[in-house]
C-alpha cells in the first residue's frame, strides 16, 4: 500500500513521532475534522506499519511503539465520538481474537466503534478457543459473531469456530452470521474459513454489521 500524499499524521505516524502525531490529532480536532476521519488515517498508518514489519523494515519494537501511539489516539478520540442511537441496542455482537493470536488492536477498535453505534458488545479477549466461542454463542445468543486474526495461524482457528457454530443443535444459533477481520484477511481467506462476511477496516465492519442486522429484521 502506498502512503497517501500530503497526510502529515500518517507520515509522522510512520516515523513513530509520538508527540507530533498527538499534536496533529489535536490540531485536526480544533480545525473541525471528524474523529472517524482521524481514526481512518490511523488505521491506514497501522496497516502500513504492518507491511513494513513484514518487509523487514521495522522491528518488533517499532510495532509496539506504533500500537502505543494508536492506543493514545483512541484515548483522545473515544470520548468525542457522538453516539446516535434511538435508546435501544442496535444488536448483540460477540467479538474476540481467535486461538493462536494475541493481536487485539483491530478487535478493540471494532468494539469501541460498535458500542458508539449502539451495539451491545461481548468481548471474549485474545487467544480464544473455538469451543469457548461456541459455548458463549449458546449462552449469549448474539446477533453476530466477529472473529479477529492477524496471523495465518488464526485462519485454522476461525475455520474450526465457524464449523462448530454451524454444527450447533439450535438451528437459529447455527445460522448466526460470522464476520472475520484482520489486516491479512481477503476473499480467499474468508472462503477458506467459511465466514459470511469479511473486512480489514473497523469502520466498514461497523457499517457491515448494521447492514446485516437491518437485512435480517
Image (cartoon, rainbow, N blue to C red):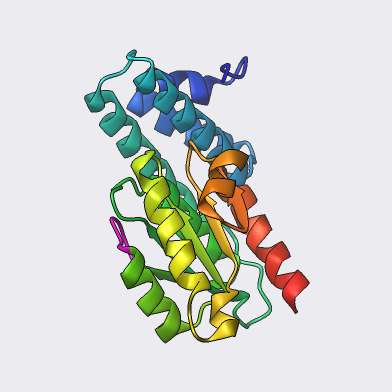
Query: In x, y percent, where is residue 152?
Result: 39, 38
Residue at 41% across, 27% down: 50
Residue at 44% across, 77% down: 137
Query: In x, y percent, where is residue 23?
Result: 43, 31
Q: Nearer the viewer, residue 34 or 41?
A: 41
Check if residue 181 falls in the magenta segment. no
Looking at the figure, which quarter contains the N terminus?
top right
Picture quarter containing residue 39? top right
Q: Is residue 5 left or right of residue 92?
A: right
SS assignment for the magenta stretch, majority = loop
Q: How many numbered badges does the structure rendering display?
A: 0
Q: Is residue 207 left or right of residue 106?
A: right
Looking at the figure, which quarter contains the C terminus?
bottom right
Residue at 44% across, 69% down: 164
Q: Is residue 8 left or right of residue 72?
A: right
Q: Is residue 79 visible?
A: no
Query: In x, y percent, where is residue 144?
Result: 56, 70
Whether 148 is drawn above or below 153: the answer is: below
Q: Is residue 144 left or right of residue 105?
A: right
Amino acid at each position: 500500500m502506498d502512503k497517501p500524499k500530503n497526510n502529515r499524521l500518517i507520515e509522522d505516524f510512520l516515523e513513530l513521532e509520538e508527540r507530533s502525531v498527538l499534536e496533529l490529532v489535536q490540531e485536526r480536532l480544533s480545525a473541525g475534522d471528524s474523529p472517524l476521519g482521524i481514526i481512518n488515517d490511523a488505521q491506514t498508518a497501522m496497516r502500513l506499519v504492518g507491511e513494513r514489519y513484514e518487509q523487514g523494515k521495522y522491528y518488533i519494537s517499532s510495532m509496539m511503539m506504533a500500537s502505543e501511539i494508536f492506543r493514545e489516539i483512541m484515548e483522545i478520540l473515544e470520548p468525542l465520538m457522538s453516539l446516535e442511537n434511538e435508546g435501544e441496542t442496535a444488536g448483540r455482537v460477540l467479538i474476540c481474537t481467535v486461538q493462536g493470536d494475541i493481536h487485539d488492536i483491530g478487535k478493540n477498535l471494532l468494539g469501541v466503534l460498535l458500542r458508539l453505534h449502539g451495539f451491545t458488545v461481548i468481548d471474549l479477549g485474545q487467544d480464544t478457543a473455538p469451543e469457548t466461542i461456541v459455548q458463549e454463542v449458546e449462552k449469549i445468543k448474539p446477533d453476530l459473531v466477529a472473529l479477529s486474526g492477524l496471523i495465518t495461524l488464526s485462519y485454522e482457528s476461525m475455520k474450526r469456530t465457524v464449523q462448530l457454530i454451524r454444527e450447533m443443535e439450535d438451528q437459529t444459533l447455527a445460522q448466526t452470521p460470522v464476520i472475520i477481520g484482520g489486516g491479512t484477511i481477503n476473499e480467499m481467506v474468508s472462503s477458506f474459513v467459511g465466514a459470511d462476511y469479511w473486512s480489514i477496516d473497523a469502520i466498514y465492519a461497523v457499517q457491515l454489521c448494521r447492514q446485516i442486522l437491518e437485512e435480517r429484521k
